[in-house]
Image (cartoon, rainbow, N blue to C red):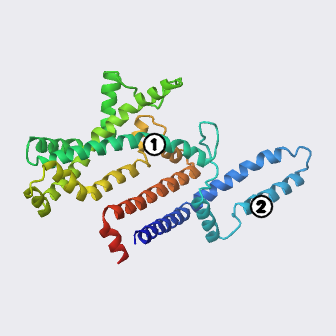
Amino acid sequence: MYLRFAVRRILNALAIFCIEMLIFSVLFTATAERTLRAQIEESLHPEVARLRNATAEQVEKFTAERRAYLYHVSHLDQPVLTRVLWRTLDTLTFQFGNSLTIKSSRGERSVWKIIAETVPRTVMLFTTAIVLQVLLGIWLGIRQAQRAGRALDRSASVITMIVYGLPPWWVAMMLIMLLAYGIPMFPSGGMHALPPPAGVASIIDLVWHMALPVITLVLVSFWGVALLARNIVLSILQEDYISAARARGLAERSVLYGHALRTAAPPLTTIALLSLLSSVFGNIIFEGIFSWPGMGNLYWISIEQGDTPVTLGLLAVTTGLYIAGLAFLDLVYGLLDPRIKTGASA
């Protein structure tokens, strides 16, 4: 039964990804083809320059034949629908081509290599922050639920209302002013010092540069996770089977961790996994403030410079990772809550 449920969820995810890539291809057809034609014309110049002894007619004939060949290889001489389907197929197989202006750290213009450089940086920064904020948030939420209405619960709720509504970019700038310039404890931005150190010192330098962005993200976001966890656990602690467990004389720790948290596992898992999925996209403003060379920063640069192949590649990668994460979340839900896969089969 679970295998059927898992296969169905995976096939649904693949179908959704294909449909979204088709939509992206339709929306970006004109821009992508204009970019591709410009790349073809650019590639013709060095080939024509090698024809030093050729006449003007020979150069013109060679240019026309070479242009027609490249248009044919790139499917630019086919109907619009066919071109869209070919572009969708290229996107589905992660063949993004070359960028217009953006290059990787090694000077390569392959879109895939450019994106592959930035994904680990974004995941490293935001996943570290999200893991910390989820752990701290769930821990604080459980403590609030245990002491509902007491000083800890009231004070944490007030702080949540104040802090959670603050924009992360504003908090980031305030902390940079305080901890990077006022009290110079951390660097104001970047991923490494210049010149970057080598060996173990490189890892220490990376952690030092990550510290302030991670502190900012955790400080702003874990209060909201705590509030959600508090409400979930508190509603479960009021169920009849929790009262029956207490009436049987079970220790409060056993009631909380053996009964309440087992029931709260699916929604808490949703909070954790959805937060982790959001780490893939990065944050354009946040990464810009800290000069962090991740996907958010790459999004901004590609849009600012009109580098359509990089923008399309980023959309495809982030969408694919997000849909894969949602499918994984469904599979985990099916393991944690048997009612889900039973209902799906029904």
Q: Which tag is nearer the camera, tag 1 or tag 2?
A: 1
Compared across the picture, whether 176 is left or right of 105 comes to left
62 displayed left or right of 158: right
Instruction: Pick the quarter of the image with the C terminus.
Output: bottom left
Query: Which residue is outermost to the bottom?
Result: 346
Q: Nearer the viewer, residue 59 or 139?
A: 139
Which residue lies under the disc numbered 1?
122
Residue 134, horizontal then vertical, whole percent: 30, 46
Q: Secondary structure at mark 2?
A: helix
Q: Which quadrant holds residue 345?
A: bottom left
Q: Nearer the viewer, residue 65 or 310?
A: 310
Residue in view at x 57 percent, y 52 percent: 308
- Image height of 199 relative to 289, above or below: above
Q: Secondary structure at mark 1?
A: helix
Residue at 78% x, 60% y is 69
The answer to whether 47 appears left or right of 118 in the picture is right
- Distance from label 1 to label 2 (Cα)? 41 Å
Residue at the spot 58% in from the left edge and 64% down from the top edge: 88
Q: Is residue 10 visible?
A: yes
Q: Position of residue 226 (x, y in %)?
A: 23, 47
Residue 68's disc number: 2
Q: Amino acid at mark 1?
A: Thr
